[in-house]
Amino acid sequence: MELVTLPSLMPTPTGAFPEVPLLALDTLWFQVSGTICNLRCQHCFISCGPDNHRLGMMSLEQVLGYLEEARDLGVREYYFTGGEPFMNRELVPMLAQALAQGPTSVLTNGVLIKAETAAKLRGLQDGSEYSFDLRISMDGYDAATNDPIRGAGTFERIMQGILRLAEAGLNPVITVTEALPDAQTREGRGRFLEFLRRAGLTQPRLKILPLLRMGAEAGRQRGYAPWESLAGAHLTEDELRALQCSSCRMVSAVGVHVCPILVDDPVGGMGRRLKDSLRPFALAHPACYTCKVDGLSCTT
Ligand code: SF4
Ligand code: SF4
């Protein structure tokens, strides 16, 4: 008989935490709407919501300042997220400047994308020599699977946003988390792609993301267990290179953070300016275990 070790009985790792060097600052993230979101998803790893103002909106001036510093440091690409980035009224001019400097992506729940927004985004794409990607997150093929996670009525509203982008000639990447039970299987992925084709996306693009057991998700299912840790681990050069924190930083209204995952945890704070953050980081947060074991990268 095969013996199975229950997760709760897994030994807690001990030893020093490995450090990840910043090999190159290639990617810069902007938390433009802080922790403020129009939705309140059950699995949100930073517990964003309409009344969560722990991290506030970034101003256009702040974003332009970081973009200037990023250009001087050789940053290659830009990502805008939140919270819900379209709640920031200055998002379009922020994107226009980013697109003057490099490839740019926006991560959104899609609910606020009206026809005029989609037309403006198409204009931004047409006016840039760099690629422009929209990423829309959802959690199911229908209201029955999506809405328990993202909120009543959100499936319809997200689909409207996706179709408005498609009508404007934009092909968003759809992201789904493992909160959808079979999302990570070949069959589940195939089923989701078929659903998107039937919905009207002729060349659907899909990214499946593992869950981070923190924020609201820690209450929905469970938080990290003591054994989910990189204490004492030795990471090869290739494994370190695969971690997004070896080539990215995140900025918010309060300063620079090591990565898009630890934006709301004091341990991820790295200073006020990008130049303050060009140093190694100890992988001591349990979320680092998810990045290593599940190969999580927030980039497209
Ligand atoms: S998961 Fe995204 S859409 Fe949902 S509450 Fe968090 S930031 Fe908002
Ligand atoms: S959470 Fe992931 S991306 Fe962030 S510091 Fe840890 S390993 Fe790096």
Image: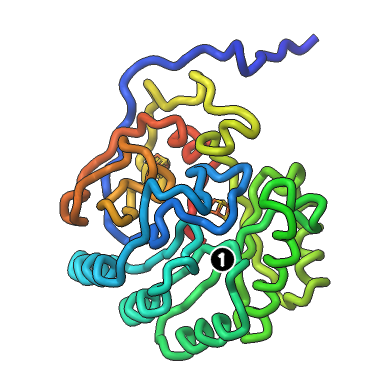
Q: Is residue 270 above or below residue 226?
A: below
Q: Please give the residue where the numbered disc 1 appears in the rendered image.
A: 135
The residue drawn where x is 65% and y is 31% is 221
Q: Can residue 27 be seen in this view?
A: no
Q: Position of residue 149 (x, y in %)?
A: 69, 47
> Does the rendering let one see residue 10?
yes
Q: Is residue 146 left or right of residue 127?
A: right
Q: In this view, does 2 lie above or below 125?
A: above
Vertical position of residue 66 compared to residue 130: above or below: above
Where's residue 153, x and y in %? Answer: 74, 59
Q: Please state which of residues 133 and 242 is positioned toward the viewer in this rendering.
A: 133
Color theme of the render: rainbow
Q: Residue furthest front?
A: 51
Percent coordinates x, y for residue 244 in the rendering:
40, 50
Give the mark count. Answer: 1
Q: What's the residue at 32%, 30% (across, down)?
A: 18
Q: Which quadrant of the frame does ligand 2 lie within?
A: top left
The residue positioned 80% from the left and 9% from the top of the image is 1
> Which residue is pictured at 32% across the width and 46% down the height?
258
Q: In which quarter of the image is residue 269?
A: top left
Kindly tell me whether mark 1's CB lies below 8 Å from ligand 1: no
How packed mark 1 is, by other alpha carbons closer than 10 Å (few <14, some 14-19, many 20 or more), is many
Which of the 4 image quadrants contains residue 160?
bottom right
Under tag 1, what secondary structure?
strand
Identified by mark 1, the residue type is Arg
x, y percent for residue 93: 36, 79
